[in-house]
Each structure stands twice: as structure tokens, then as C-alpha cells.
Amino acid sequence: MTKQFRIDFRALAVGAFASLALPGLAAAQDLQDVRLRLAWIAGGVDAPIFMAAEKGYFADAGLDVEIVDGNGSTGTIQAIGSGDFDIGIAGMGALAQAQQAAGASDIISVAGLLQKDPTSIISLEGSGIAEPKDIEGKRMGTDAGNLEDGMIRAFAEANGVDFDKIEVIIINGGGDRVALLKGDVDFINGWANPDGDKVSAMHPIEEPLLFADYGVNLIGSSVIVKKDWLAENGDAVKGFLAALQKGKADVAADPEAARDIFMEYRPDADPDAILLEIEVMQKYEHTAASEGQPYGWVAPEDVELTISLLEKYSGMEPGLTPNDIYSDAYLPVLTQ
């Protein structure tokens, strides 16, 4: 008992000495704790966050960031609104809808991470679907959520497609890809990546028709914060976004190293799938209007389009302006 006591005492003494002798240890205690909730279970799209954590960019900005997986944009928006988390990752379109329908006007986005919507028309090679009008007279497999958000109807209207000439087959639970491969439907309404990748691994596909390339684009993943927390922690948000930009630059420079770092934080993930997502999702980080701008910067016209599409096709109440849901005041202007 006495021996155990002496060992513990010496360990405490050594620890105390180290905290005095090593300024870095003492400085670590001064970092601001920040709780970050992702939109979904961490994936390759979140690689810049893990890179920033691993390389010490968050720490350099004075932040100790705890990264927690999410279960959808709605859950993350609610978690930020309740104050359970400081910073969140959620769809900007989902935030706009939450502001109007769920009283989330106290939350704002400060950066757009995935600005080009991957939603697309996916069909097997030989389907004859090479342009929007080709989906007329065909069978579409989609889940209820994709149908209810109204964007497939927006895509049809924007491209002169008679939606009444499409046979809609509701298939929930990811079964739409199976139905496509079996020939039970002619095309599905899903993300070009990774849904299209999963189908093409089993059978060659036509080039997916991205909604964003045909006039229909909802800004997706964005960094969100509660406005009152932002008012008191503006420097922390600026530091977070600056660290995120540095992390993104490292990911772009070496995707395989980014994959390896991601796996250290989420060892149960599929490394091949994570690398594929890191590589392919980069093409969705900018729209034509924001191309060439720093990572995270959003063009006002893209925010306006997101709002107008939701008002016209998703039943969102009118009245929101771009300034209600997005501010670029905290995003450092850095070259990529």
C-alpha cells in the first residue's frame, strides 16, 4: 500500500514538473474547447477537418476541437440550436427550411463546403438516357425523400421534361440501386457519387446527369453556428475556418495521406471507400459562380437559387434573403 502511494506521488511530481518545464503543455490548457457535430457519420468529405486536427491547425488557432458524428442535417441543426454543440456541418438548404419551418432563425452558415449538388439521374449504359428529355416514358426508382424535396420536378420543369410521362416507383432503404441493376427501373434519382459509383462497380453506367449542370442546384454541406455564440466567439470561428482551409489544401495535395489520417480517427471505416470519396467529392466543392474562390466561399447568386428553388418546389415559405442564412464575414481570404 505504501509502495503504491509512493509511485503515484512520484508520477504526480513528474507531471507537475513537466507542466512547468514544457510551455507547450501549459499552453494546451489554454485552448478553447469547441464541440463540432458533423452532418453524418464521418466520411471522406470530412477529411479536411481531420487533417486540420492532426496537423495541429486547430490548436494553432487556439482551439481544441472535439469531432462528433451526426445523423443528418436536421439533427445537427437541432443540436446547434439547443447549444449542445458549438459548430455544426449541415446542408445550407436544410438550414433555410429549418429557419422557416422550425424557428431556426438564430443559426447561420459561415462557409459552404459542398456547393455543387451531386444529385443526378443515374442509368445503366445503353439506357438511351443522355439528356434530360430522355427520361420521358421511362421508369424512375427513387426514395420518398428524394421525391418530396421537389428537386426532380424542378429538374424536369427547368429542362422541358413532362414529368407526367415518367413512371415513378418509390423504393426506400437503398433498394433503388438494386432495382436499377435488375432492370426493374430505367433510372434512379441519386447522388452521382457515391450512388453512381456503387452502381458502376456492378455494371457500366451512362454519364450521370447532374441537376446542378441543368439549372437546379441546392447548396449542400456548410459550416453552421448559432448567432449569439458567433457574436461572442467570432475569433474562434475565424480560426476554425482558417484551419479548415489549411486542412483542405493538405488533403488536395495528398489524398492518400489524408485517407491514412482519417483512418487513425475512424479505424472502422473502409479505406478504399474513404479515398474514393476524398477524390471524387472535390469536384462538388465549387459551383461555376464560386470557382477559383477560397474553399468555403459561397456566391450570393447560388444562395439565392437555393432559396428560390425551395420556395417554388419544396413548399418553403417565402421571405428569406441570402443574408439570413449565410455570412462570409468570418471566412479568411486565402488562395488555394
Image: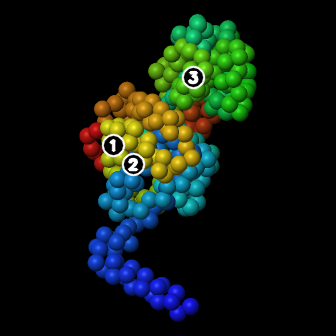
**Residue 136 found in image quarter:** top right
What amino acid is labelled 1 in the image? Asp
Residue on which disc 2 sits: 51
What is the spatial separation of the Cα atoms under label 1 and label 3, in whole angstroms? 29 Å
What amino acid is labelled 3 in the image? Ala
Q: Which mark is residue 111?
A: none
Q: Horizontal and vertical percent for residue 69?
A: 56, 51
Callout 3: helix, strand or loop? loop
Q: Horizontal and vertical percent for residue 28?
A: 36, 69
Q: Horizontal and vertical percent for residue 139?
A: 69, 14
Q: Residue at coordinates 43% horizontally, 44% vertically from top-left? A: 260
Q: Please say whether residue 300 is visible from this viewpoint.
A: no
Residue on which disc 3 sits: 201
Circle 2 residues within 10 Å: few <14, some 14–19, many ≥20:
many
Q: Horizontal and vertical percent for residue 9?
A: 45, 87
What is the spatial separation of the Cα atoms under label 2 and label 3, in whole angstroms? 29 Å
Which of pointers 1 and 3 lies earlier in the amino acid sequence?
Answer: 3
* Contact check, label 2 and label 1, Cβ < 8 Å: yes
Q: Nearer the viewer, residue 26 or 30?
A: 26
Circle 3 residues within 10 Å: few <14, some 14–19, many ≥20:
few
Residue on which disc 1 sits: 250
In the rendered image, the vertical position of residue 307 relative to residue 65, given as above or below: above
Circle 1 residues within 10 Å: few <14, some 14–19, many ≥20:
some
What is the spatial separation of the Cα atoms under label 2 and label 1, in whole angstroms? 7 Å
What amino acid is labelled 2 in the image? Met
Which of pointers 2 and 3 lies earlier in the amino acid sequence?
Answer: 2
